């Protein structure tokens, strides 16, 4: 019985050691209803402004860009707001 338990332990350890951890994967666009980030590499090849507008519009909000970290591994950050600064009107409601 001890040999079987040892064999199962060794086999499960070998299976776990061969599986990738996937701890280094980050999607190019990540966010929620309060804002998000866009990978700088994606922002160089795609329209980052339109990506952010589409993301915030899906929550019925408008976008406000916050910062750009312009190097490899950097990001473009943005916030989703209910109304633009200085506006007395409700944001345009888009339905997808």
Image (cartoon, grey):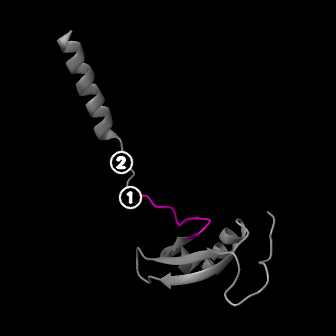
Q: Residue at x 60, y 78 (%)?
A: 48
Residue at far front of view: 88
**In terms of secondary structure, where does tag 2 sit?**
loop
Q: Residue at x 80, y 71 (%)?
A: 93
Q: Residue at x 46, y 61 (%)?
A: 26
The quarter of the picture where the C terminus appears is bottom right
The quarter of the picture where the N terminus appears is top left
Residue at far left of view: 2
Could you tell me how far apart the alpha carbons at marks 2 and 1 are, in whole angstroms? 8 Å
Q: Residues within 10 Å of mark 1 (few under 14, many from 20)?
A: few
Q: Is residue 54 magenta?
A: no
Tally the numbered discs. 2
Question: Label 2: which residue?
Answer: 21
Q: Residue at x 50, y 83 (%)?
A: 67
The reply to whether discs 2 and 1 touch (Cβ–Cβ < 8 Å) is: yes
Q: Is residue 28 magenta?
A: yes
- As drawn, the label of residue 5 is none
Above or below, 40 relative to 31: below
**Image spot of residue 50 (x, y percent):** 67, 77
**In terms of secondary structure, where does tag 1 sit?**
loop
Q: Residues within 10 Å of mark 2 (few under 14, many from 20)?
A: few
Task: Write down the quadrant of residue 13 in the picture.
Answer: top left
Question: Label 1: which residue?
Answer: 24
Q: Which residues are magenta?
A: 25-35
């Amino acid at each position: 019985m001890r040999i079987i338990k040892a064999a199962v332990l060794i086999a499960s350890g070998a299976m776990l050691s061969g599986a990738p951890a996937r701890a280094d994967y980050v999607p190019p666009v990540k966010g929620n209803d309060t804002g998000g980030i866009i990978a700088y590499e994606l922002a160089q090849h795609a329209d980052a402004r339109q990506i952010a507008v589409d993301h915030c519009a899906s929550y019925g909000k408008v976008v406000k860009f916050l910062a750009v970290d312009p190097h490899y591994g950097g990001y473009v950050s943005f916030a989703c707001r209910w109304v633009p600064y200085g506006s007395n009107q409700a944001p345009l409601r888009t339905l997808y």
